[in-house]
Image: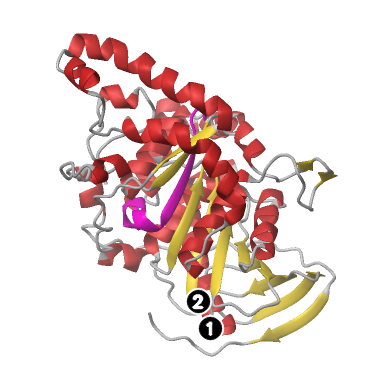
């Protein structure tokens, strides 16, 4: 959903809200020339001075949000698995007093599905899928999964292949993205059937957040979702990203096919149907937490704001950081004391604690007291941000302001009007199986049609 955003509020980087301000400021707004000169520095000076104290601020979710639209039949058909998963194999990678790490390999018609499952000793009917940043060793994702399971939430990483990074697969990007969603859905089927999971959430950083916007937009079982440093509108995002690897990929593909840069993006746009701008609106904004980096140029901040609008303005945390400095808000690596796996004192695991707070509230209707000190420090910046924020903020709800009007982009409205007949010929993903203890291997019963 894309509500209107005023140019003045865009300058603050926090969306567009009908302001609740002192009478002096309200009167100044009636004089556009004066207001336009004053609001930009006022917003920035007020927020930045307080942000320096905490490094971030948050906006509450849109209080006028009524819920997501119904998922189109054509979208469900396009991403629907043709049949159930096949046999599977489980291997124990690590056992501690707080969790068991299993490597689960599942056969499917859409290609092998490899899952790192972090299971707590206590039986639970909930599961958080952690979406990988990139194909590879999943260092960040394993840290997040360990942190979640040690906080009481089973977590599972559905591993990705590196196919999409290979320039020779450029013409097959849509097929690769689509199959990723289908394998995610089969993984959900697996955990429902084999482990009795009933409640699902997701967590993703960077590319992982983009994957959350895709899979959770398609499958309603992913109900509670945390997206950090993600974006939407992939074709233009790739065009505007400052990441060197993306630029190198564009150059390699263009050179091998004789494309100009414009030709590359025309070809990408012509084939790419799987994009958050067509799926993010189906996430429930009330059950979503978004984290954005104000100075992010890898996944440009403006595309994060677009994602926020499309989801329906969920609760959002704004970090005073770019894409990579944002990792300082996690404890992926503990500096004090030094450790790659164990938690420490510094840096503070802020993103992890906010995610745990979100899942405790969502799954258990509980509260994470560990996050309270940081919430108290944030309070002054949050109050100013809410006061300068747009339609749907807590202040707007408190004073009984009029409901805002949501608008859908015409392209979004028409995208799923016509059913799509996909042509899928998955390429097997090569999986290296570690030498470890095999704990289960069997063929599941047929789950039947959805």
Any part of residue 264 in sight? no
State the residue at coordinates (57%, 28%). Answer: 53
Q: Position of residue 55 (x, y in %)?
A: 56, 31
Q: Are marks 1 and 2 in contact (CB under 8 Å)?
A: yes
Q: Which mark is residue 266?
A: none
Q: Position of residue 377 (x, y in %)?
A: 55, 37
Q: Position of residue 12 (x, y in %)?
A: 37, 25
Counting every numbered tag in the picture gives 2
Tell me if mark 2 has few (under 14), some (14-19) or many (20+) residues whose alpha carbon lies within 10 angstroms of its own: some
Where 30 falls versus 246 (above or below)? above
Tell me if mark 1 has few (under 14), some (14-19) or many (20+) residues whose alpha carbon lies within 10 angstroms of its own: some
Q: Which residue is mark 2?
A: 189
Viewer-proximal residue among 355 and 386: 386
Mark 1 lies on a secondary structure that is helix
Where 169 falls versus 216 (above or below)? above
217 on left or right of 346: left
Which corner quadrant of the image does residue 112 belong to? bottom right
Q: Which mark is residue 193?
A: 1
- Is residue 295 inside the magenta stretch? yes
Viewer-proximal residue among 185 and 123: 123
Tell me where the magenta segment starts and ends, as one range: 279-296
- Is residue 131 inside the magenta stretch? no
Image quadrant containing the C terminus: bottom left
Viewer-proximal residue among 150 and 118: 150
Where 234 falls versus 137 (above or below)? above
Q: Position of residue 166 (x, y in %)?
A: 60, 44
Mark pair 1, 2: CA separation: 6 Å
State the residue at coordinates (56%, 74%). Answer: 108
Mark 2 lies on a secondary structure that is helix
State the residue at coordinates (69%, 51%). Answer: 136
340 on left or right of 375: right
State the residue at coordinates (45%, 46%). Answer: 290
């Amino acid at each position: 959903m894309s509500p209107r955003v005023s140019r003045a509020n865009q300058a603050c980087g926090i969306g567009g809200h009908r302001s609740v301000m002192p009478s002096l400021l309200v009167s100044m707004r009636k004089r556009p020339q004066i207001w336009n000169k004053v609001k930009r520095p006022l917003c920035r000076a007020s927020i930045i001075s307080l942000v320096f104290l905490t490094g971030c601020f948050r906006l509450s979710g849109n209080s006028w949000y009524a819920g997501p639209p119904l998922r189109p039949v054509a979208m469900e058909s396009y991403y629907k698995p043709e049949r159930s998963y096949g046999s599977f194999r489980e291997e124990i990678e690590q056992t501690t007093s707080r969790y068991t790490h299993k490597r689960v390999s599942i056969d499917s018609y859409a290609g092998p599905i490899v899952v790192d499952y972090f299971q707590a000793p206590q039986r639970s009917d909930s599961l958080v899928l952690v979406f990988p940043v990139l194909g590879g060793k999943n260092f960040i994702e394993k840290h997040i999964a360990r942190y979640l399971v040690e906080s009481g939430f089973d977590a599972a990483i559905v591993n990705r292949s590196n196919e999409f990074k290979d320039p020779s697969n450029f013409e097959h990007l849509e097929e690769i993205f689509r199959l990723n969603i289908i394998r995610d859905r089969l993984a959900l089927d697996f955990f429902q059937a084999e482990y009795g999971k009933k409640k699902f959430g997701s967590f993703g950083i960077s590319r992982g957040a983009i994957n959350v916007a895709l899979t959770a937009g398609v499958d309603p079982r992913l109900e509670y979702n945390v997206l950090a440093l993600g974006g939407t509108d992939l074709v233009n995002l790739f065009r505007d990203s400052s990441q060197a690897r993306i630029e190198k990929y564009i150059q390699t593909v263009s050179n091998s096919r004789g494309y100009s840069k414009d030709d590359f993006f025309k070809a990408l746009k012509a084939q790419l149907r799987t994009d958050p701008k067509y799926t993010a609106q189906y996430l429930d904004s009330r059950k979503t937490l978004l984290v954005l980096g104000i100075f992010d140029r890898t996944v440009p901040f403006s595309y994060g704001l677009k994602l926020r609008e499309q989801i329906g303005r969920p609760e959002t945390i704004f970090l005073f950081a770019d894409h990579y400095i944002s990792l300082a808000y996690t404890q992926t690596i503990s500096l004090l004391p030094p450790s790659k796996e164990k938690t420490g004192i510094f840096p503070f695991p802020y993103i992890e604690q906010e995610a745990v707070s979100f899942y405790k509230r969502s799954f258990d209707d509980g509260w994470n007291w560990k996050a309270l000190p940081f919430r108290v420090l944030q309070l002054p910046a949050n109050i100013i941000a809410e006061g300068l924020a747009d339609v749907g903020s807590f202040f707007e709800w408190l004073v009984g302001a009029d409901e805002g009007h949501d608008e859908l982009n015409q392209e979004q409205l028409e995208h799923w009007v016509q059913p799509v007949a996909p042509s899928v010929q998955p390429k097997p993903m090569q999986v290296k199986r570690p030498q470890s203890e095999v704990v289960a291997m069997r063929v599941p019963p047929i789950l039947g049609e959805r």
